[in-house]
Every structure is written in structure tokens, then in C-alpha cells.
Image (tube, rainbow, N blue to C red):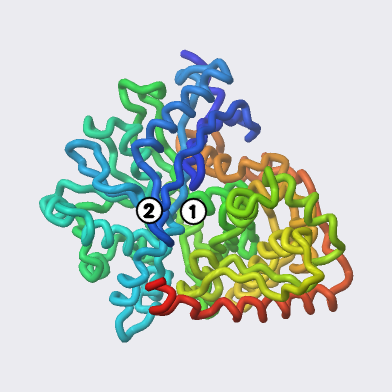
Amino acid sequence: MTEKRFVMAIDQGTTSSRAILFDHAGQIVSVGQKEHEQIFPKAGWVEHNPIEIWENIRECVADALQKAEVNRHEIAAVGITNQRETVVVWDKNTGQPVYNAIVWQDTRTSQIIRELAGDDGPSKYRDICGLDLSTYYSGPEIKWILDNVEGAREKAEAGDLLFGNTDCWVLWNMTGGVNGGVHKTDVTNASRTMLMDIRTLQWREDICKDFGIPMSMLPEICSSSEVYGYGRKNGLLIDTPISGILGDQQAATFGQACFEKGMAKNTYGTGCFVLMNTGEEPVFSNNGLLTTVAYKIGDNKPVYALEGSIAVAGSLVQWLRDNLGMIKSSEEIEKLASTVDDNGGVYFVPAFSGLFAPYWKDDARGAIVGLTRYNNKGHIARAVQEATPYQSREVFDAMVADSGVELKELRVDGGMTKDEMVMQFQADQLGVPLVRPQVLETTALGAAYAAGIAVGFWDGEQDVIDNWAEGKRWEPGKDREEYDRNYRLWKKAVTRTFEWVDADVENA
């Protein structure tokens, strides 16, 4: 029998899908990656084609195996991580989606949110599911599909439709699709739907009823580390156990070995996501954060986290590149921002689809404030660079207030951590060291660890801690007075974006 030497992680992200092979030391062996189309049918609408995603994943798996020159016999397990709240609804008999995937950034459900909130307001379900009503989560997106796609509700009530975040869609297809595909998800993804009781880890029939979602659509909720099923007979991973699922931000928290209460990580990607481990009891926020499941390993107790989600981080740099043409590649932003000594009084609040944590204002829109004739494109680039660290500081202020735990250091990952200016500015703003690990692909790594632990390839969290290694550290500067002054001006700028969307805007 061939020795099992690798674990594969499938990372189904917002802009691309990847298959990554890891060895026992947690090092990357090979990567297959493919971008998928971002579909914007209307202002505030964001969609993906689920069929394209599934086709891309198959290509990525083939690519990763081919580059490493290995086959399924050397792979111990497969883990899946995914862009959490992005919703797919499909026909279980044909395997065809009834509509495009509605992406977590999409804001079309704002009217549904207002109707569901009624007189109780956005916090109506917070004590049950840990989340305030928002366009961000899966439940309202499912409701929109059932209410607006012709024939969908009838099919759903007849028991013919299935729902899943993209982890669920990938798992179902990988395990056979219409030929015996497994319809399961894990606690971290389920905690992003608004439909799961965060204490019991079970679907809530009463909330599903409020949302008009038949229970038959929902996947079985499992832990983050157990064997869900095996690779389909006509794929490349025949009979390989698929045994780890974590939403992308929880996977990064796991890959960063944030296993102790108070440990935190920030992933700087399309958006920005801060998670702080709060231990085995959920902490409910009074400061605009959300309560989520960080991970659950097999039969162990679940571990919870406070999370702050920032909608626009790396995607602001993409916007500067693609929409304004100020830079030709994302890497150029640091050079352009370095042509000036400071932001020249300019602040850029990227509330393109409203503000996420800690404000949760879906009626906010982006603004550049403080402009004078003195300013040039270097200042705008600088303001773009600073926007993410400011937004992250707001989230950490809220976390410390909710948890009562002071931040000692922050573990960071994601594409933006290659930008020295952003990272140094973040350390300055937070006043604590930032630490980046040697392996930057912490999201995929976390999913790989969860999958490998389930089949005994790794022994548990201690192996993850032992494999984690520091790659780079940024120490905060000393000029606290100046950092705080800038931060106050940022908060002033944020207030200028509130309540922009009204009837005039919507009818424009």
C-alpha cells in the first residue's frame, strides 16, 4: 500500500478556487489555482456561477496533483474551506443551481432584512444565533432566491431543492452529486446562516419558519473535523476521505494556531476578517461584533470566537487599479503611496456596500474626505493604504471592550501582509506587534489540518502549534499622540458616510 504523505486543501474563495497539497510539516508542495468571474447584474448585486466554480475546482485538483507528480494513493485526506456566506441553491435531482450563487458582499436583501427585523430591530435573533440581521448572511439570501426565482419555492416545498454555502456545494459534487452526493456542512459555516442556534449547534425551526425556508433544504451540521464522505468514483480523488470543513476565516484562525483564549488573527484579503478566540462559551457583543463558532474538532466541545468583518480591504486596491486606472498592478500601490510623507489630510472610507463591523450600516456609501488642491494621487494611494488598518483598529477596540482581554500581539495573514507600509501602519495604530507566519496560506492550511487530524495524519492541535513558525514581525512605533490624532480624524470621516442611501439615491 502506498504511504500517505500529503493532505489536500480545497480553498473555494471569493475571487478564485485553489487546491493546495501540504506535507506533514505543514509546508506547501504544490498549488493549482483558477479565478472565476465576478458577476454584477445591478448596483449592490454580486454573483458567481456555481457550475464554473465546480469546473475550476476539478482543474485545480488536477493541476496540483500533476505539479507534485502524485496521485490519490498518496493523499491521506481532503479538507475544504470556503467564502462562507455565499449561497448556492440547487436541484438535488439534476445537480443544477436554480440561480447564480449570491455572494456575501451582495446587498440586495436589505428590504428583506428590514421586514424580518420589524419592530424588534436588527438584533432580533442575536441571542440565538450570535448575529444581527444583515445582508451579509446566508439565510436572507436563501429567502431572496425562493421569493424571486420562478418555481423555486414550489420546488423547495416539494423537497427537491438543497441549500449550501460553497463548502456544501463542493462536498456534494465531490462525493458524487446526483449519484449519492453527501449533503453536509460544518458548525463554522452553519453559524453564518442565521439559522443555527449557536449554543446547541442545531438548526432552529422557528427561525427557518420566519425566513420561509423549508428545513428539507438544509444540510446536516457536523463538526469541523470528521469523515463526511469519500471522493466520487469518476473523479481524481476516488475513495479519498473528505474530512475537514471550516469557513475561510475560521480555517485561518486554526492554521494560525490561535487555540488559546484571547489569541487573535487578522486575514487581509478581499475583505478583512478579525477573529479572537473566546474559549468554550460564546461571548455576545455589545459593540457591533458577531459571535461565531471558531472550530469544533470531532467530539470535542466547540470553541467560539468574536469576529469583526470589514467588507472592503484588498478590493479597494483592486478598485483603484481596475476602475480608476491609477496603478497597473496591485503591487504598485506601495510605491505610489511612498511618494508622499503622509496622507495630506485625506481619508478614504470604502463603504462601497455599506459599513460592516462595528457599525453595520447598509445605507452608508464610500467617501473620500479632506481633499484640497494640495493633494495628489500619492495622497489618495496613501489614504487607500491606511483605510484597512483604521478599520481593523475599530474592530479591535470593540473586541477588547466585549471580551475584557487586552490584545498582546496580532497574527496576520493574507495577500496584503506583503505590503510593508500597511503592516507597519497597522502595528502603529494597534500599538502591539504584528506577526506573520512562514506559511502564508493559513486558510488552506487550517482546512488541511482539520482534515488530517480526523484521519490521524496529525495528532491534534499540538502538531499545529509545533508546525507554526514566525516569518516576519512588525513592532509598533512610538508616536502614540500622532497615531491617535489620525485615528480620530478617520472616525470623523466615517461619520460622513452614514445614511447616504435614501429614496433619491435609490431612484437615481
38 or 417: nearer the viewer: 38
Circle 2 is placed at which residue position? 41
Q: Residues within 10 Å of mark 2 (few under 14, many from 20)?
A: few
Q: Position of residue 67 (x, y in %)?
A: 57, 20
Residue 354's x, y, as percent? Answer: 50, 69
Which residue is found at the position 46% from the left and 75% from the top?
A: 363
Q: On the rendered structure, is 234 left or right of 278?
A: left
Seen as rendered, the residue at the extreme top is: 1
Quadrant of the rendered image containing residue 199? bottom left
Residue at x-position 32% and y-position 64%: 140
Q: Position of residue 168 (x, y in %)?
A: 35, 44
1 vs 2, front mark? 2
Which residue type does callout 2 highlight?
Pro
Q: Amino acid at mark 1?
A: Tyr
Q: Position of residue 117 (x, y in %)?
A: 33, 78
Q: Which mark is residue 367?
A: none
In the image, residue 16 above or below residue 71: below
Residue corresponding to mark 1: 295
Q: Residue at x 37, y 70 (%)?
A: 110
